[in-house]
Amino acid sequence: MYSLDDLGWNSFFSQQVTDSERARWQPARVVWEGRQRYRLSTGEAGWRAGLAGRLRHAAASRADLPAIGDWVLAALRPAEGSATIHRVLGRRSCFSRAAAGRSTDEQIIAANVDTVLLVTSLNRDFNLRRIERYLALAWESGARPVVVLNKADLCADPEAWRREMASASQGVPVLVTSALRGDGMPALMEVIGAAGTTALLGSSGVGKSTLINALVGDNRQAVRAIRDRDERGRHSTTSRQLVCLQGGGILIDTPGMRELQLWDAEDGLEHAFADVEALADGCRFRDCSHGGEPSCAVTAAVERGELAAERLANYRRLQREDDFLRSRHDESARLERTRKAKEIAKAVKLHYKLRRR
Ligand SMILES: Nc1nc2c(ncn2[C@@H]2O[C@H](COP(=O)(O)OP(=O)(O)OP(=O)(O)O)[C@@H](O)[C@H]2O)c(=O)[nH]1
Ligand SMILES: [Mg+2]
Ligand SMILES: [Zn+2]
């Protein structure tokens, strides 16, 4: 049995609810997300939920619809155990990417997250460049990132990897764990217990669900809620899910992502590459791209061996990607305005036509 507070409810959300809304609807948190289907928790009970037609129609983009971790207002039908979602409350933070294959639509990976664990494994999956990308998105989301290097049991010298990671993560805490052997679990538990809501992100197979199982321990209620294997028996998460730990702390499990395109990550990139940004103050040109311009302080640092060439290359790649996506968003916003203007013109025309009859 949980209370709304155990689920993360606080004044940031409660102050958004008007008296008339309070009279009709209940606050609930999205704890499972499928295709346009949801499961909500009000603390003491769980509810299957769909969207009110008005909410669906008013949504200009996918980002206006509920996502895992969202707080919503819903009409509950206790006899059926089901509910209808009428409003998504304003988010405190959200981790987004451009929807796969559609760079003009924002997809929310998890909402109202306080800490994101960027999980990678100490084997072939280990990739500093990917972590840099995740870090940019994490900083942009408003959540606090923590890097987790899992599967330490498969690696002869985890400490060497941790040191290498530390240079790419710019002061973000880096934890080394083995979900299998239990290494580093107390430190991880400490981060999670103090964090409110923690989302686990990372490629498929790095051990996100195994870490959650290890953290949940013998809490049977929560274990049952985790669908560790999908219908085909694969060891892989297919939907996003939120679970509460008995001792405090809320976890969001997500399926591994193959593609993680940036979404308006300008500030996030600045944060994730604070070292490059600081060096850039010394470039001769204010809009220096650090791609061979004269008197470039950034390429000078690479030549002196103070900045890894791969890190600079990744920074420039992510900057270009962000610029491109931003131009695409501006274009789609322009098209949307044109479409609206045409619709209004049509409605006005029809109005006069009917009046003339
Ligand atoms: N050796 C070792 N194997 C691990 C560890 N953690 C997880 N695994 C194994 O790695 C495989 C994948 O683990 P999952 O927890 O399903 O990975 P996931 O990140 O949730 O993957 P998706 O749900 O597909 O995104 C499983 O076979 C786990 O048993 C670890 O610390 N050490
Ligand atoms: Mg999983
Ligand atoms: Zn430069």
Image (cartoon, rainbow, N blue to C red):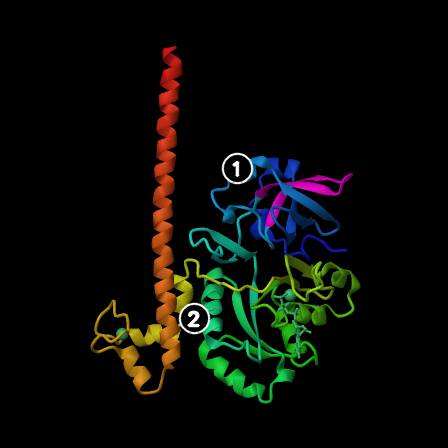
| Nearest-to-viewer mark from 1 and 2 | 1
Position of 230 relative to 41 (above/below): below
Q: What secondary structure characterizes most of the magenta part?
A: strand
Q: Say what amino acid the circle numbered 1 marks.
A: His
At 27% from the left and 74% from the top, the residue drawn is 291
Position of 282 relative to 109 (above/below): below
Position of 258 relative to 160 (above/below): above
Percent coordinates x, y for residue 171 in the rendering: 47, 77
Q: Indicate the secondary structure of the residue bearing disc 2.
A: helix
Disc 2 packing (10 Å; few <14; some 14–19; many ≥20)? many
Percent coordinates x, y for residue 158 in the rendering: 58, 85
Label 1 – label 2 distance at C-alpha: 37 Å
Q: Which mark is residue 57?
A: 1
Q: Quadrant of the N terminus?
A: bottom right
Q: Quadrant of the C terminus?
A: top left
Q: Which mark is residue 330?
A: none
Task: Work out whether residue 125 or residue 79 is closer to the camera in this orientation and state it.
Answer: 125
Left or right of residue 137, residue 196 in this image:
right
Is residue 250 in sight in this rendering? yes
Left or right of residue 293, residue 339 in this image:
right
Question: The magenta stretch spans which residues?
Answer: 71-87
At 39% from the left and 67% from the top, the residue drawn is 318
Is residue 281 in sight in this rendering? no
Percent coordinates x, y for residue 337 in the rendering: 36, 39
Give yes or no for contact between labels 1 and 2 (Cβ–Cβ under 8 Å): no
Q: Which mark is residue 272?
A: 2
Quarter residue 192 falls in: bottom right
Q: Say what amino acid the circle numbered 2 marks.
A: Ala
